[in-house]
Amino acid sequence: MSPLFGKSLPDKSIVRPATDGKAVNDASDYDVAVRSVVVPPGKKVWRIVRVHHLTPAENKNQHALYVRLIDERNQPVKTGGVQLDWGQGWQDIDLDPEGPFALVYPLAWGTVYRVRVQSLLSDEVIGIHTYHREERKGNKQGHHSFAVTWQRKVPSVAVDNPVVPSSQPVTTAKLLPRFAELTAMPAKTVQGEEVPVHEKEQKEIIMPTTQIAPSQGKPIPHYVLFGRPFSQGVRAHFALAMDYLLHFKLSFGFNNINAACLAKRVTIIANEESFMPEDEQQLRQEGCEVERLDLPPGELLQVLQQRMEKEQSFID
């Protein structure tokens, strides 16, 4: 069983290399591309031998990245790690030495990933995301998974494959129009940043500070505070938290400490660069109960989903 999703893992055939020994990418129609690294002849390198978008029958409505590493003799490698980047720089992720895959990593809605192997030079997969429509039962909207297999090789010649497709790599910002279309959320201006907001929920979740009188004390039960508009990671944080905001009908804003000070409880979803620690301390001095969720996308999504399941928006 998968510790991430509580469902059976797909068959290991999803990470089998192509029989002709050449790199195969059947996920190019889903914006996924391979960027091959140039290495001197005779130097070890991690080469991609398969990139696969899971079919509905294989996926069963999960949203994950499955990784397999094999050595020169096609034997599994489960020591070391990979590096993932979701817009906040490369993060080291350890491999699972016990599981059927070297790594099973949850893919968060609203985030674009790239991945490579640690230690040696490595080919890189870019453009992994779940901004995709439903494809029959098994690949619901936003529930798409990918499998990547690397093999450790010693090439006889240097290789420099171009990124495929030839267009610029997909980014979260480029995908926001598709995100708004898929979720049927028209763009609205919220605290100075244009973000998708569900029309029928707009009046409930947006509480303009101009309508709140200071004499009311703390009229907002719970406020969710994101970082500065357009700072790194803020759009991804907002997209990941959207279901959570709508579920609890929470007020929210972007770097709006004045509005947050009017709340009894404040959840900060931001790193310390987009919302400063001294501002967090000011909220505490104003009598707010404060928590900060500065987590990788997969962990943040899990935490927010658990709160929705428990009907608990804030953890004391």
Image (spheres, rainbow, N blue to C red):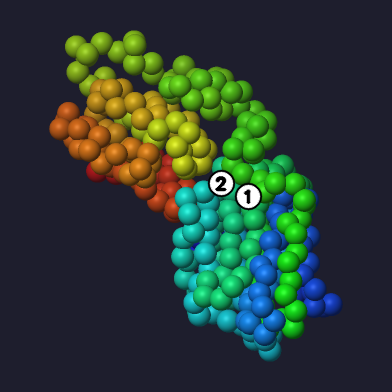
Q: Residue 183 location, x and y as percent?
A: 63, 33
Residue occupying the point 43% across, 42% down: 308
Answer above or below: position of 233 versus 89: above
Which quarter of the figure is the C terminus placed in?
top left
- What residue is drawn where x is 58% and y is 53%? 113
Residue 131: name its quadrant.
Answer: top right
**Separation of marks 1 and 2 at Cα, in angstroms:** 6 Å
Instruction: Identify the amino acid type marked 1.
Output: His
Q: Is residue 271 above or below residue 46?
A: above
Question: According to the image, label 2 marks what residue?
Answer: 111
Instruction: Give the secondary structure at mark 1.
Output: loop
Q: Position of residue 140 (x, y in %)?
A: 68, 46
- The amino acid beneath tag 2 is Thr
Count of marks overlaid on the render: 2
Q: Earlier in the sequence, mark 1 or mark 2?
A: 2
Taking the image as shown, residue 103 lies to the left or right of residue 34, namely left
In terms of secondary structure, where does tag 2 sit? loop
Q: Which mark is residue 218?
A: none
Q: Which residue is mark 1?
A: 129
Q: Is residue 164 left or right of residue 148?
A: right
Q: Residue at point 77% right, 51% down?
A: 166
Q: Is residue 174 left or right of residue 257?
A: right
Residue 310 visible (yes or no)? no
x and y percentages locating residue 161 in the rendered image: 75, 64
Above or below, 168 against 17 in this view is above
Q: Residues within 10 Å of mark 1 (few under 14, many from 20)?
A: many
Residue 153 locus on image (x, y percent)? 68, 82
